[in-house]
Amino acid sequence: MTSPLDPPDGNWWDRAVNRRETIWLGIAGAWSLGIFAWMSGFTRFGDQNPIGETYDVEPEAYAATVDTYEENAETTSTAAIEESRAPTEEERQDVLVPPSKSVYVFPRRFSWGGLPVVLEAGTEYDIHLSSADVQHGFSVRPEESLSQQINLQVFPGTEWVVPMSFDEPGTYQVICNEFCGQGHASMHGTFYVVDPAEYETVTGE
Amino acid sequence: MLATITRLFENDYDEDGFRTCSVTGLNIHRSAEVHVKLFGLTAVIAMIVGGLFAFSVAMTRWEVVGLIGEFEGYYRHLSMHAWNLLIFWMVFMEIAVLYVGGPIVLGRRLPLTKVAKAGWGIMVAGALAVNYFIWTLSGGSDAPLLTAYVPLDVPLGFYGGAILFLLGATVAALPFLVSIIQQKREDWNGTLPLVAFGAFVTFVIAVQAILGGIAAFSYAFIWQAGIIDTINAGIYRQLYWIIGHGSQQINLLAMITVWYFLTHVVGGAVVASEKVSRTAFIMYLFFINLGAAHHLMVDPGLSAGWRIFNTSYAFYGAAFASMIHAFAIPAGLEAGRRQRGLGGGLFGWLTSAPWKNPIFASTIFSIILFGFLGGITGVLMGQMQLNMTWHNTYATVGHFHATVALGTTLAFMGLVFFVIKTMFQRNFISDRLALLVPYGYAAAMGLASLLMVYIGILYGVPRRTSQVVSNIIGSEFSLSAAEPLFLILGPMTLLAIIVGAVFVLVAVGSLLGGSRTTESDAQALLPQGGLVPDGGSDSVHAVEMRGTFTLCLVFMAAFVTLYVLNWFLLTQLWSIGA
């Protein structure tokens, strides 16, 4: 009788292992290697990987970059996007139209700088993420399908450039899912993703 | 009152201070037993404090009740809940587990008892300081929650308290190490019993984790004290998670050690293979703390190669080890019971088991639920790409409630019951209430954990927030589609808290008002045929283990199914990443 409370007798290392236990070791070992291989392989053939270039950047320097970006950006309006029409001159204020394929997101307690922004479906954008103050959580989902959501961590002092291409037009809601202080729960922003055929119309270009 | 408490620490010892436990047959020295009781009782107090805050946290997340608003101190309550349950309840219990696994199993005195007491004192001081600085948080400062992420403005004293507590835990663990050294000096070629070996590996993992924690909190401390001007959020996170997750790996190892111990003592389990079980512990030693990197899967600044190697515990070396224990422990039970003639058919060994013994039931529910809920979700969320859909959602809360609040807590509840019966030598004030604990807690907390995972993954509800499901302030958008699930989750969390209160009632009530156990009470705890029945053979490997094998195949089928489902969900997303 082998007890876990007593030292094992004799040469316990060479004692036989039950056949089914041996088979289980094979199954569990193969599964472990298999899921490792899949995770590693997916970085090569998969379309969803949390991978992008990172740079050290002081919050002030990043803020200056974002200022320049916003000055160069046109604006449109939520109403125009929702109604698939050109914005009137008075309306143009609340939604950014990025001047290039670089999109800057700049969270600070308790708002998402750089948002809302309007993007073209199917086009790859470089999403730049960096924080003005504390850590934030960049949590995005299409409004009508809550199970399709992703989450990325945002640091102050680090700029993360993650390429994204939103395949489906729609309203993508952003909330903060890293605790950033009292007021955290109110932090939200929006990506409007529109059909390429309508993009020029709603952005008024 | 003082006399009552003093009496709790008394037992009949011989003139050398030893007594023989009538349940386990272990030769227990007074010095070891007294300290196990001291740390165990302190753990239960931390559990009571953390449990009180479980109520306010759960009733806030259930937004229909919405007990405490974001600006009314919700984050303070959440911080109290996290530190008292995830850290203080667990670490005090773990020191007790070390003292059981070392000196008590080896039949030795606890060496350096003054050091043990000093460790306890420092831990208590640290824990009190952490609680104080969280509770007295003033308007300008930020609540730490569990992680105290820089550069939040967390009070300096909080970091000081956390460092103190960790130093105390290191000091308290030293007598354990010395007892192992003494044992090896006397018998260099001897092999430690499996439980002592498991406790030793737990100790090594604990020291690694604690050193990381001291580094993290010291880094934040000198920054908050103004000694350094800037602090790097990413470096802090890397250091922090050495303790943040490492502390939970201590739980895991302590719990597995308790599984081997309790399945043997109350279920009649044997060791299916010393070689296989010990190899699994060695794999933990090398690989398990690497897995802490899965908290950094969606952080900037870390290469994909680094993340994939570490989060996979180096090719899933530690997940493999866990799957080895997942077979070895039930197989030991199956083999032990079949050898006693208690196992007809595929599952006769399990159906004939002492299910009316709350210690046995706690242990088995802990094993099953930890594996199916905690283990599988842990591996899923630890895959770099899947982590994008799990990170900081309510699903992660579901995962660690399945592991710590459900799995480890059930095992430790079983251990507390066992210690009440065998060390405090008290009967339960109510056997029926004691039996309600494992069944009620496993059901309520099991369902609650599952719902949290579901709500997090399928509705993207974040953790660490008081209000987003029904209303996000200033936005028309909300996550209210998840509301119906909270109608089940809310009552389940409440039920789990009530059963937790019953546990405390039974534990404390039995200590203060339970009758003294007799020889026959002790015998009643043991498996049929006693702990070491006559006629057992050494050839455990030849005993049938097909029941366990079947259970493990069911586990693997669940694992594969959930794995495929999670990846399917991920590939439905827009394209992300270089």
Image (spheres, coloured by chain):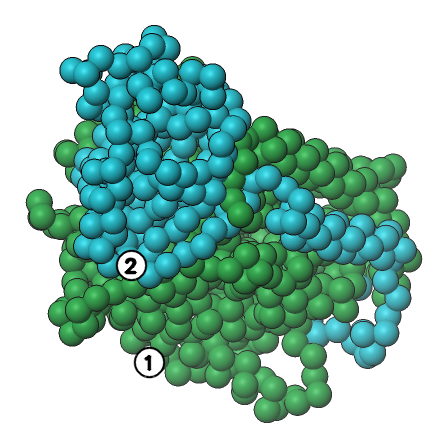
Chain colours: A cyan, B green
Q: Which residue is mark 1?
A: B114
Position of residue A162 in the picture relative to residue B232 (left or right) = right
Q: Give the label on residue B92, or none.
A: none
Q: Which residue is mark 2?
A: A57
| Label 1 Cα neighbours within 10 Å, binned few <14 / some 14-19 / many ≥20 | few
Q: Quadrant of residue B473?
A: top left
In terms of depth relative to the viewer, which is nearer, B231 or B352? B231
Image x and y of residue B11, in percent? 43, 65
> Is the Cβ of the residue at disc 1 closer than 8 Å to that at disc 2?
no
Element under disc 1: helix
Rendering coords of residue B418 (x, y %): 52, 52
Report the amino acid beneath label 1.
Answer: Lys
Crowding near the residue tagged with mark 2, few <14, some 14–19, many ≥20 C-alpha atoms within 10 Å? some
Q: Is residue A203 visible?
A: yes
**Residue at 41% over, 48% down:** A161
Q: Quadrant of residue B372?
A: top right
| Foreground residue among B72 and A11 | B72
Say whether residue B78 is left or right of residue B373.
left
Residue displayed at 39% across by 83% down = B112
Instruction: Report in which chain the residue with disc 1 lies.
Output: B
Compared to B11, does B370 lie above or below? above
Of tags 1 and 2, the one toward the viewer is 2
- Furthest toward the front, the residue is A205
Element marked by disc 2: loop
